[in-house]
């Protein structure tokens, strides 16, 4: 009898553990972190997007890559159903007309187009201060990994954390840069690029995407359609850069001068000492890089928004340059 009772107790505990929900519930429920697309806390939207398509089915690459939507469907306010599908392992790099900063609460929000609270297609999210080095948010999936979630299967968002696509259409998943405060290679007060990478939801380690603990992230798989994978709707910015929120000590750059800005053709950079610099266009493509000693003049060929990253003694600062 004792053995039987012990067996029942273990089974009960196992059941409770497997159904424990650790994270925020669906949109509209108490404790949800979902942010509606019309929320007044969203200040800006992505203005540049570069999409690298993923496979229709990563296990059968003869089917090619997904094709639904265009890069421009990821720009501006969330406007489901105008989305771009990433496909298995596909990615999108978003840029902005502002610099994202670590402020109070969430700093930006990512929108997908799920038609309900349980058909969720997920993506991991990474950020960069220079368009070259990216740091990933520590994603967690507590969804079981014993049985594969099918292509039209369901997920419970209460098992998901730091994964874009956690909420249904028109409700975004928030991300807080404070969580990356101890990361190297990133200035959380000066983020210029966000990279969103589709979760390949296979529980087979040969194909799937692990979370921060090495657990495979189980989400609908396969989805062998032109619309397969994460469907990116929009990325909204909540907290933006200002000198008062930057953790860079401005006195390290007190001699810095950049003019004219906006410019019609060239601009001049003046510094005190030697600085490394990287000039990027709004899509994150490196236009020019090198070192500056005292001063340097740079010519811009095309109109638009550029980002200039300057580094000295381990400190980095980013300035937006405009050519009209």
Image: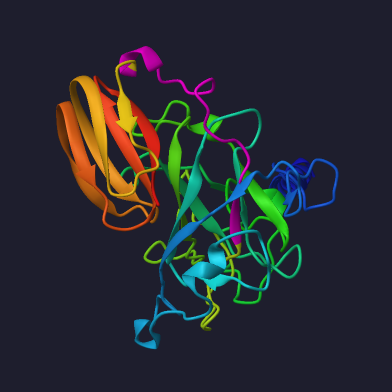
Name the magenta segment's main secondary structure. Answer: loop
Where residue 128 sits, quadrant-wise, is top left
The magenta stretch is 234-253
Answer above or below: position of 64 versus 155.
below
Q: Position of residue 26 (x, y in %)?
A: 77, 53
Pick the front one: 134 or 199 = 134
Residue 236 among magenta residues: yes
Residue 162 visible somewhere in the drawing: yes
Answer above or below: position of 245 versus 167.
above
Q: Position of residue 220 (x, y in %)?
A: 59, 70
Q: Position of residue 217 (x, y in %)?
A: 53, 57
Q: Residue at x 31, y 36 (%)?
A: 309
Q: Is residue 284 left or right of residue 176?
A: left
Where residue 149 sits, quadrant-wise, is bottom right
Q: Residue at x 34, y 15 (%)?
A: 254
Pick the front one: 270 or 201 = 270
Q: Position of residue 208 (x, y in %)?
A: 44, 63
Q: Is residue 297 left or right of residue 60?
A: left
Pick the front one: 283 or 175 = 283
Which image quarter holds the N terminus? top right
Q: Residue at x 40, y 66 (%)?
A: 207
Q: How many marks?
A: 0
Residue 166 among magenta residues: no
Residue 208 visible somewhere in the drawing: no
What is the basis of the colouring in this image?
A: rainbow
Q: Which residue extends farthest bottom?
A: 62
Q: Is residue 80 left or right of residue 249?
A: right
């Amino acid at each position: 009898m004792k053995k039987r009772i012990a067996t029942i107790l273990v089974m009960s505990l196992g059941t409770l553990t497997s159904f424990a929900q650790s994270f925020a519930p669906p949109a509209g429920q108490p404790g949800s972190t979902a942010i509606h697309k019309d929320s007044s806390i969203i200040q800006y939207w992505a203005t540049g997007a570069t999409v690298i398509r993923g496979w229709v089915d990563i296990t059968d690459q003869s089917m090619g890559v997904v094709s639904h939507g265009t890069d421009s469907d990821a720009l501006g306010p969330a406007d489901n159903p105008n989305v771009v599908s990433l496909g298995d392992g596909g990615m999108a790099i978003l840029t902005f007309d502002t610099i994202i900063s670590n402020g109070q609460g969430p700093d930006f929000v990512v929108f997908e187009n799920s038609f309900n609270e349980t058909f969720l297609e997920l993506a991991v999210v990474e950020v960069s201060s220079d368009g070259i080095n990216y740091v990933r948010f520590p994603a967690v999936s507590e969804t079981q990994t014993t049985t594969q979630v099918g292509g039209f299967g369901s997920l419970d968002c209460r098992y998901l954390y730091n994964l874009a696509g956690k909420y249904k259409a028109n409700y975004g998943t928030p991300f807080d840069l404070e969580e990356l405060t101890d990361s190297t290679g990133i200035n959380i007060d000066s983020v210029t690029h966000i990279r969103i990478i589709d979760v390949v939801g296979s529980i087979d380690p040969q194909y799937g995407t692990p979370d921060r603990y090495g657990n495979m992230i189980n989400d609908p798989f396969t989805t062998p359609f032109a619309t397969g994978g994460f469907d990116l709707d929009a990325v909204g910015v909540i907290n933006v850069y200002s000198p008062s929120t930057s953790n860079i000590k401005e006195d390290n750059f007190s001699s810095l001068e950049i003019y004219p800005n906006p410019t019609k053709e060239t601009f001049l950079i003046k510094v005190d000492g030697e600085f490394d610099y990287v000039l990027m266009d709004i899509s994150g493509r490196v236009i020019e890089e090198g070192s500056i000693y005292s001063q340097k003049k740079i010519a811009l060929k095309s109109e638009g928004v550029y980002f200039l990253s300057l580094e000295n003694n381990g400190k980095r600062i980013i300035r937006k340059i405009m050519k009209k």
